[in-house]
Amino acid sequence: MNSNELKRIIEQVSRDRGIDKMVLIGTLEEAIKSAVKRKYGMSENFEVTYSDETGEIDVFQFKEVVDEVTEPDTQISLSEAKKLDPESSVGEELGVKLDTADFGRIAAQSAKQVIIQRMKDAERDLIFDDYKDRVGEIISGIVQRVDKGNIVLNLGRAEALLPSSEQIPRETYYRRGDRLRALVIDAKLVSRGPQIILSRTHPDFLAALFAAEVPEIAEGIVKIVSVAREPGSRAKISVTTEDGDIDPVGACVGMRGSRVQGVVQELKGEKIDIIPYSQDIAHYVASALAPAAVIRVVVDEATRSLEVIVPDEQLSLAIGRKGQNVRLASRLVGWRIDVKSESKYQRGLKDGYQSLIRLPGVSETMADALFEAGYGSAREVAEADSQGMIEALKLDEAKVDQVKEAARLYLDNLAEEDAVEEARELMAKEILAMPSTSESDDEVAAEEPAPVEEAPAEEPQEDASDDGELQ
């Protein structure tokens, strides 16, 4: 193979495979090194260079210039060195050019194998570098095969895997040759090559679909704050914008729902609720629980929990089928949500206030002050932080300790009464389960067998038969 042909092949492979030419040149130099080692048995005392301008490969073996040669593989005499370089001197190293055409058939085959393998490795690394930077993007591929529920997609230069765990439940998946879209969630480099993992259930897949359908999201005018999904069933997405002239929800819905319908169709009918984001957590959760109406939201920032009060007739609507609506709303806002009906909440307030009034040594005025400060029951008073009560009620520490002690005493007495009541109920159940005396007698009588009267012995009778014999 002459230099011009080698140069042409390198340029063609670089262009066709999309591999950097310098990577191919480095691979070629490594292949020649391998062939040189096999041919000459050298260690590392040589150098291989490729000229991109001429397409020629030069191999130089470095030898030490000495007066008397004792090791021909690593040393050269001064007289021989001066023939190559007149300025050579003892102690220097001199590069001796080798004839690359004299590698032999085995060396050439070895070089070819190394080049092929390095080209595969370079192409594999190039594909991996391409897809590792595309994590979080949607890609489209052709269904190549289905292996134990896992779908393998052909992406052109690479294959991708859509595991069964990342497939939408009850979604009818495609036959060979169908086109499928999914989100890149991971890219790994394994021995067989780059492994690209896809998902259609990830919340980011829904966000990426909206970014593709809604130009305002792609341009950064409208931002997606949070996404909560139960793939194949229902999803909630909250959006916001800093542009006062744009309705973020309307931008995502589109004219006559055209934009959101594009996403719904891609997800095969998954219902999507688009929620306006609010920094006010009460307004935010009220929107997240739509379509149910919210009467009141009680916020506990210490435990990041919300008590949401809804009308009695909308309790089931707020909770949703099997708790789906409140579960998705909780994931969306990132807070724990406890939904209560209005009547139950009012009963709780009444019972809590009554427990404050019943505290020993606590006046009705003090009970009102506690209730207005947010301590709605004796239990809340007993578990409250003393310093917080001092600041909220403007009381001294001794008075607060007295109130908290009264609350603890009340709860202890209440627990004792409950224990006594439970014991009475248990005893009553045991008594009711015991059989009565009359029932026991009847049962015993029923179990005794009745006396059997002996029948009189019967006289044997003669039975005349046709043949006159006694039977």
Image (cartoon, rainbow, N blue to C red):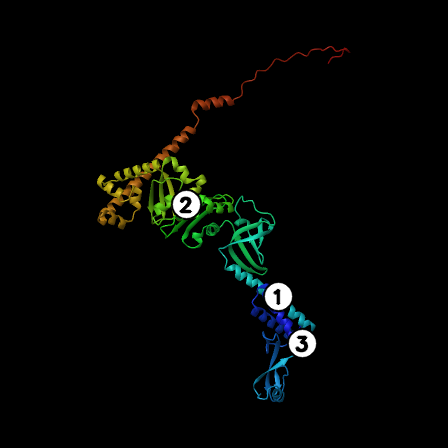
Image location (x, y in percent) of residue 403 = 25, 44
Tell me the quarter of the picture where residue 32 sits: bottom right
Tell me the SS state at disc 3: helix
Tell me the distance, in whole angstroms, between the alpha carbons under discs 3 and 1.
Answer: 22 Å
**Amino acid of disc 3:** Ala
Tell me the SS state at disc 2: helix
Tell me if residue 108 comes above or below residue 194 in the rendering: below
Image location (x, y in percent) of residue 175 = 60, 47
Q: Inspect this view and state whether residue 33 appears.
A: yes
Checking the image for residue 318, the label placed there is none
Return the residue found at the far right: 467
Q: Quadrant of the N terminus?
A: bottom right
Tell me the SS state at disc 1: helix
Residue closest to the eye, 143 or 394: 143
Q: Choose the circle earlier in sequence order: 2 or 3.
A: 3
Q: Dot 3, how many residues are within 10 Å of its Cα: few (below 14), some (14-19), or many (20+)?
A: few
**Amino acid of disc 2:** Ala
Q: Residue at x 35, y 34 (%)?
A: 421
Checking the image for residue 117, the label placed there is 1
Q: Nearer the viewer, mark 2 or mark 3?
A: 3
Q: Inspect this view and state whether residue 236 appears.
A: no
**Amino acid of disc 1:** Gln
Residue that numbered label 3 is attached to:
101
Q: Choose the circle earlier in sequence order: 1 or 2.
A: 1
Q: Dot 2, how many residues are within 10 Å of its Cα: few (below 14), some (14-19), or many (20+)?
A: many
Image location (x, y in percent) of residue 143 = 59, 51
